[in-house]
Amino acid sequence: GKFKLGLAKTRDSFTSKINDLVAQFREVDEEFFEELEEVLLQADVGFETVMELIDELEMEVKRQNIKDTSGMQSLISEKLVDIYNAAGDDEDMSLNMQPEGETTVILMVGVNGVGKTTTIGKLAARFQKEGKTVMLAAGDTFRAGAIDQLVVWGERAGVEVIRQAEGSDPAAVMFDAIQAAKKRKVDVLICDTAGRLQNKVNLMTELEKIHRVIGRELPGAPHEVLLALDATTGQNALVQAETFKEATDVTGIVLTKLDGTAKGGIVLAIRKKMNIPVKFVGLGEGIDDLQPFDPDKYVYGLFA
Ligand code: GDP
């Protein structure tokens, strides 16, 4: 359904190229592996993972005495899933939700333009569909228009947005939001944050302060720190991930705009480099275009 549709671009490029490659019923030779390597690198799978995959495939081809490319496609997807699973700890893709009656606090972080606000709106709608009450905190007080944009998403999802004036202290917004969430017994509070990376020290200081205030007002919170990364930025997303990982305890990644790129292999590169689970993927600009991430479904979906 949606998942496959959203991945159409990656599938068209990555998969159709692999399909073309294997459909030729040619010999599995050095040239075949070179072409496969090229396709995978173009899809942003990442150099290390590609090398690992090629090595594994070459071994398997020898072991099973495979001569031509029939059957290679399933072998490739199988190995991709294996490599994904072996690249880090067992992945917990579920959100760390608090028991009923307690507020779960989710902090959204990420660089401007990656789709943070949109993701917050999508998450709000998703929780509401599950029958949960949701509140948003407009913690990006820095970027002009960020508060209004979150308010628009709040209206769209039908949830309350706690806000202060532009330029105010984001930690103060968080303080207000936690008080309001506790008072109204809200199930989920999702907090937006500013995404300027230009000044790493500022970013760290601000995130630390927000974290501290939230934790002081509600011990144990935030329960999730979700980092939004734009899939279309390719390897650049990895650099951002490193920076945010240093600045705060990122518990999960939301990979946005996966519908807008032919480079869906970035999921594998993130797994290899970060060991932070991708928990959701963004597959469009609409309120319903957010899907929980499932690596098996993802890799096999690319080939389906
Ligand atoms: P923010 O600055 O990080 O809050 O980013 P926004 O939420 O404002 O999103 C920036 C742009 O990306 C907007 O035009 C969104 O519609 C678009 N966008 C966000 N998520 C997705 C997605 O999953 N797919 C596509 N195609 N566009 C997205």
Image: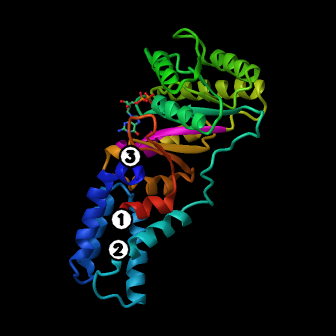
Residue at 36% across / 65% down in the picture?
Answer: 303
Measuring from the top left, give residue 176's x and y in whole percent. Answer: 68, 16
| Magenta-colored stretch includes residue 229 | yes
Q: Any atom of ligand 1 within 8 Å of the CB at mark 2?
A: no
**Mark 3 neighbour density, 10 Å: few (under 14) some (14–19) many (20 or more):** many
What's the image's color scheme?
rainbow
Magenta-tinted stretch: 224-240
Distance CA(mark 1)–CA(mark 2):
8 Å
- Badge 2 or badge 3: first in the primary sequence: 2
Measuring from the top left, give residue 152's x and y in whole percent. Answer: 46, 20
Residue type, mark 3 in image: Leu
Residue at 38% across / 88% down in the picture?
Answer: 62
Residue with the most extreme bottom position: 65
Q: Is residue 20 above or below residue 44?
A: below
Say whether residue 105 is left or right of residue 259.
right
Q: Mark 3 points at which residue?
A: 258
Residue closest to the eye, 258 or 187: 187
**Mark 2 neighbour density, 10 Å: few (under 14) some (14–19) many (20 or more):** some
Q: In which quarter of the image is ligand 1?
A: top left
Q: What element carries label 2?
A: helix
Residue at 42% across / 83% down in the picture?
Answer: 60
Q: Name the residue under label 2.
A: 73
Measuring from the top left, give residue 65's x and y in whole percent. Answer: 37, 91
Q: Any atom of ligand 1 within 8 Å of the CB at mark 3?
A: yes
Q: What element carries label 3?
A: helix
Residue 303: mark in rendering: 1
Say whether residue 130 is left or right of residue 115.
right
Residue type, mark 1 in image: Phe
